[in-house]
Image (cartoon, grey):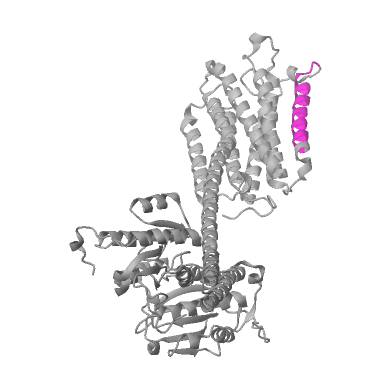
C-alpha cells in the first residue's frame, strides 16, 4: 500500500492555538487514533511516523508536548526522549506502550519522562498527563548553547 | 547398516541380536581368532608338560566360567524378553546349560573337593565335561539353523520358565545317571583310564566336538548377519582351539600345559558374548542418550518458535484492537464536546471499521496458514494461479504508474500443490516486491513475474522488483521468523513462504536483479501425471 506522497509528518489544525502536541507512532492506525483522541481533548496535534522524522521536522520547535510510542523501529520513544534531553530544549514527553513493564516504566520516569501510559489509552489518564505536561512546558537548561541539532 | 530381515519383526533394529555387524567388528573378530591360533602354535612344544600342582586354580576357574555363562544366559533371556526371538531363547538356554554343568563337573573333579567328603569319580567329571562340550555347540547349531520366529508376547515369560526348567531338568537327569548308585559308569574306564589319562570314549568326544564346532561355524557363517552371529563364530573358534589344545596338543592329559592353555581359551570363549553384549549395551545407551538430547533440543526449539509465534499473533491482533478502543474513545469525546464534531466522530468510526478488518485479516491469515485445508493438494496451473493473484491483489493499481509484466511460460507443466497456500506465497512475494519499490518514483517501478518450465521436472516462478535490492548484511536472516525490515511488518511472510514451498517439495531463494533490485524465486516439482482438468482455484 503505497501512498503516492506519503509524508512522514502530517499535521491537523484543530485550534489556532500556536503550540502543538506531536503524536509519534510507526503504526499509522494507532497514530491517527491517538491524534484524534488528543484533538478531541482540545489540543492541536501533528503526527510523525517515527522519532527521526520528528527530530528533523520544523514543527519540532513549536511542539509543547510529545506523545510517542515506545517500541518503534529505528529510534525508540525512550531514545527520542534521551535525544531531546541532550538537546537544548526538553519537550515534556508522554510514552505509550502496549507492553508495559515495571522496569521500563521506572527507568523512563527516572530520566524525567512525564507519563508512561498503557495502550489502549485511558482518556482521563491521558488528559491528566497532557494537562500536567502542558503546564510544565518546554524546559530550557542553562547550557542551551550546546544545541547543535538544529 | 541394514537390519536383519526376518529377525525382530516390528522391532527397531537397536538390539545386539538384530544389528548387522559392521566392518570394523568383523576385522576385530578376525584378528582375535588369528591371535588365538597363534598361541597354541607357540606353546605346542611344551604342551605335554605336567602342571598338576595347579589343580587348586581349577575351582576358581570353574567359578568364573559358571558366573560368566550364567550372567550371559540371564542377559540373553532378558534380550529374549524384549525381542521375543526364538533363536535368542535357544542361545540363552545353551549358555544356561553350559554354565550350570560347570557345577557338577568341578565338584566331581578328582582331587579338589575330596576334603568335603564328596564322593568323586574320575569318570563322572569327564562325563559332565563331555556333556557340556557336545551340548553347547548343539544349542548354537539350533540357534543358527532353525528358522527364527517371534513368539507371542503374552507367552514370553512362560517360555523363559519352560527353557530354564527344562535345561535344569536335563542336567538333574544327567547328574542322576552319572552319579546314581546303580550307575556302572564309575566302575568303567570309558572316559578316563586313570585320574589324568583319558579313556577310549573320551577319544571320541573331541572329534565329535570338533565336528560340531565346525558345523556351527559354517552354519553361523552362512547366516552371518548380526553382531551376535559374528561373535558366536569367535566363541566356537576359541572353543575349537581349546579342544585341540586339551585333547591333542596336551595329548588329552589333564593338568598338562596344553590342558591349562585350553582352559584359558574356555574362559575367553565364555566371556566373549558377555563382553560384546556389555559393549553394545553401552553403545546403545550412548546412542539413546544422544537421541534423547537431540529430541529435547528439537522440542525446545519448537516451543520457542511456538511462543514467539503466539506472541507475534497476539501483537498483530492487539495492535488493531488498541486502535479501535482509542478511536472509539476519540469518537465519544468528539460527540461529548459542547459542540459535537460529527465529522471527526464519523472519521473515528471509519477507522474502527478499518481496524476491525485489519484484525480479521490477521486472524484469517493465520487460519490459511494452519488450517486443515492447507494439506489438500491438487494439480495446479501456476500461470493461472499467478494471474488470479495479480488480479485479486490489485497489483497494477498499487504500483501506480509503474508497470507489471507477466512473463508466463505457457508450456510450464502443472504442479501438485495447495492452491490457497501457493496463492498466499505469491501474494506475499508480490507484496514484498511492491513494498520494496515504495521509495522508487512511481514511473520507474517495474515488477516482473515469470514462470519457467524446467526440463528436470520443476517449474520456477520468479518475482523481480527494481527496488533497492537486498541488504547483504541481513540477507541470511530474511527467512527467519520475526525478522523484518518493514516498519509495520510482522516478520512472518518470508518464513511462511519458505516453509510452505518446502512443504511442497520445492525451494525458495533470492538473487539480485539486473540492473537493480531483488529477485525472489521458488521452484516446485511438477506433477508426474498432469491432470487434464485444471483445478479451480476459487
The residue positioned 77% from the left and 29% from the top of the image is B170
Displayed quadrant of residue B161: top right
Return the residue nearer the eye: B255 or B477: B477
Magenta stretch: includes residue B173: yes
Residue B128 occupies quadrant: top right
Q: Quadrant of the C terminus of chain B?
A: bottom right
Residue B462 shows in the view: yes
Q: Residue furthest front?
A: B338
Q: Residue furthest right?
A: B182
**Left or right position of A32 against B411:** left
Q: Is residue B517 above or below residue B215?
A: below
Residue at horizontal 70%, vertical 20%?
B123
Q: Relative to B165, does residue B186 appear above or below in the rendering?
A: above
Percent x, y for residue A130?
41, 62
Residue in the image at 66% along x and 38% along y: B76
Q: Is residue B31 above or below residue A64?
A: above
Horizontal and vertical percent position of residue B244: 58, 33
Q: Answer left or right for B139 relative to B482.
A: right
Task: Judge by depth and name the residue closer to the eye, B123 or A135.
Answer: A135
Give the position of the N terminus of chain B as an image quadrant: bottom right
B304 up-or-down from B501: above or below: above
How many marks can you see? 0
Check the image and name the residue furthest to the left. Answer: A145
Q: Position of residue B130 (x, y in %)?
A: 68, 29
Task: Tell which of B191 and B37 is nearer to you.
Answer: B37
For this view, does B294 lie left or right of residue A145?
Answer: right
The image shows residue B302 at horizontal and vertical percentages of: 54, 56
Q: Which residues are magenta?
A: B159-181
Amino acid at each position: 500500500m503505497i501512498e503516492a506522497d506519503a509524508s512522514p509528518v502530517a499535521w491537523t489544525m484543530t485550534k489556532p492555538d500556536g503550540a502543538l502536541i506531536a503524536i509519534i507512532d510507526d503504526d499509522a492506525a494507532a497514530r491517527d487514533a491517538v491524534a484524534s483522541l488528543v484533538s478531541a481533548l482540545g489540543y492541536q496535534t501533528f503526527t510523525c511516523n517515527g522519532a527521526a522524522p520528528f527530530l528533523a521536522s520544523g514543527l519540532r520547535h513549536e511542539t509543547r508536548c510529545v506523545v510517542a510510542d515506545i517500541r518503534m523501529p529505528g529510534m525508540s520513544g525512550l531514545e527520542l526522549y534521551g535525544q531531546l534531553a541532550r538537546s537544548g530544549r526538553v519537550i515534556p514527553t508522554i510514552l505509550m506502550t502496549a507492553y508495559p513493564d515495571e522496569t521500563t516504566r521506572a527507568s523512563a520516569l527516572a530520566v524525567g519522562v512525564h507519563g508512561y501510559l498503557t495502550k489502549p489509552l485511558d482518556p482521563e489518564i491521558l488528559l491528566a498527563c497532557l494537562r500536567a505536561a502542558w503546564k510544565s512546558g518546554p524546559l530550557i537548561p542553562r547550557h542551551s548553547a550546546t544545541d547543535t541539532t538544529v | 547398516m541394514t537390519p536383519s530381515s526376518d529377525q525382530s519383526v516390528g522391532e527397531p533394529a537397536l538390539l545386539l541380536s538384530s544389528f548387522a555387524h559392521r566392518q570394523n567388528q568383523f576385522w576385530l573378530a578376525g584378528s582375535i581368532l588369528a591371535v588365538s591360533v597363534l598361541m597354541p602354535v607357540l606353546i605346542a612344544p611344551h604342551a605335554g608338560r605336567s602342571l598338576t600342582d595347579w589343580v587348586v586354580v581349577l575351582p576358581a576357574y570353574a567359578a568364573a566360567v559358571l558366573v560368566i555363562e550364567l550372567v550371559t544366559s540371564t542377559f540373553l533371556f532378558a534380550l529374549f524378553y524384549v525381542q521375543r526371538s526364538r533363536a535368542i531363547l535357544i542361545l540363552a538356554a545353551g549358555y544356561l546349560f553350559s554354565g550350570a554343568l560347570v557345577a557338577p563337573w568341578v565338584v566331581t573333579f578328582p582331587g579338589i573337593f575330596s576334603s568335603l567328603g564328596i564322593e568323586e569319580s574320575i569318570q563322572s567329571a569327564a562325563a559332565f565335561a563331555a556333556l557340556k562340550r557336545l551340548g553347547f555347540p548343539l544349542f548354537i547349531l539350533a540357534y543358527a539353523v532353525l528358522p527364527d520366529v517371534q513368539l507371542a508376547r503374552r507367552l514370553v515369560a512362560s517360555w523363559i520358565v519352560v527353557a530354564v526348567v527344562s535345561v535344569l531338568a536335563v542336567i538333574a537327569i544327567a547328574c542322576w545317571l552319572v552319579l546314581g548308585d546303580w550307575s556302572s559308569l564309575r566302575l568303567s574306564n570309558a572316559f578316563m583310564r586313570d585320574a589324568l589319562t583319558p579313556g577310549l570314549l573320551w577319544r571320541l568326544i573331541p572329534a565329535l566336538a570338533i565336528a560340531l564346532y565346525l558345523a556351527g561355524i559354517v552354519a553361523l557363517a552362512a547366516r552371518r548377519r548380526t553382531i551376535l552371529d559374528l561373535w558366536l563364530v569367535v566363541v566356537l573358534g576359541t572353543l575349537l582351539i581349546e579342544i585341540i589344545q586339551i585333547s591333542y596338543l596336551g595329548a588329552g592329559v589333564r593338568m598338562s600345559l596344553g590342558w591349562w592353555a585350553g582352559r584359558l581359551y574356555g574362559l575367553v570363549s565364555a566371556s566373549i558374548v558377555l563382553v560384546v553384549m556389555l559393549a553394545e549395551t553401552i553403545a546403545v545407551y550412548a546412542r539413546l542418550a544422544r537421541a534423547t538430547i537431540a529430541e529435547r533440543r528439537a522440542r525446545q526449539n519448537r516451543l520457542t518458535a511456538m511462543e514467539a509465534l503466539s506472541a507475534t499473533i497476539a501483537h498483530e491482533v492487539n495492535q488493531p484492537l488498541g486502535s479501535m478502543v482509542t478511536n472509539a474513545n476519540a469518537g465519544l469525546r468528539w460527540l461529548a464536546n459542547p459542540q459535537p464534531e460529527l465529522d471527526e466522530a464519523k472519521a473515528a468510526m471509519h477507522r474502527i471499521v478499518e481496524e476491525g478488518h485489519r484484525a480479521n485479516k490477521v486472524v484469517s491469515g493465520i487460519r490459511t496458514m494452519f488450517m486443515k485445508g492447507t494439506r489438500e493438494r491438487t494439480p495446479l496451473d501456476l500461470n493461472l494461479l499467478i494471474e488470479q493473484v495479480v488480479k485479486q491483489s490489485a497489483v497494477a493499481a498499487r504500483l501506480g504508474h509503474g508497470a507489471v509484466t507477466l512473463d508466463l511460460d505457457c508450456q510450464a507443466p502443472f504442479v501438485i500443490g495447495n492452491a490457497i497456500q501457493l496463492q498466499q506465497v505469491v501474494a506475499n512475494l508480490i507484496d514484498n516486491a511492491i513494498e520494496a519499490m515504495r521509495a522508487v518514483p512511481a514511473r520507474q517501478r517495474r515488477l516482473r513475474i515469470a514462470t519457467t518450465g524446467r526440463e528436470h521436472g520443476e517449474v520456477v516462478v520468479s518475482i523481480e522488483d527494481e527496488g533497492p535490492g537486498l541488504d547483504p548484511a541481513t540477507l541470511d536472516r530474511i527467512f527467519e521468523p520475526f525478522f523484518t525490515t518493514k516498519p509495520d511488518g510482522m516478520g512472518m511472510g518470508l518464513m511462511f513462504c519458505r516453509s510452505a514451498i518446502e512443504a511442497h517439495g520445492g525451494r525458495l531463494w533470492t538473487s539480485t536483479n539486473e540492473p537493480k533490485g531483488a529477485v525472489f524465486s521458488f521452484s516446485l516439482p511438477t506433477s508426474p501425471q498432469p491432470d487434464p482438468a485444471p483445478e479451480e482455484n476459487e
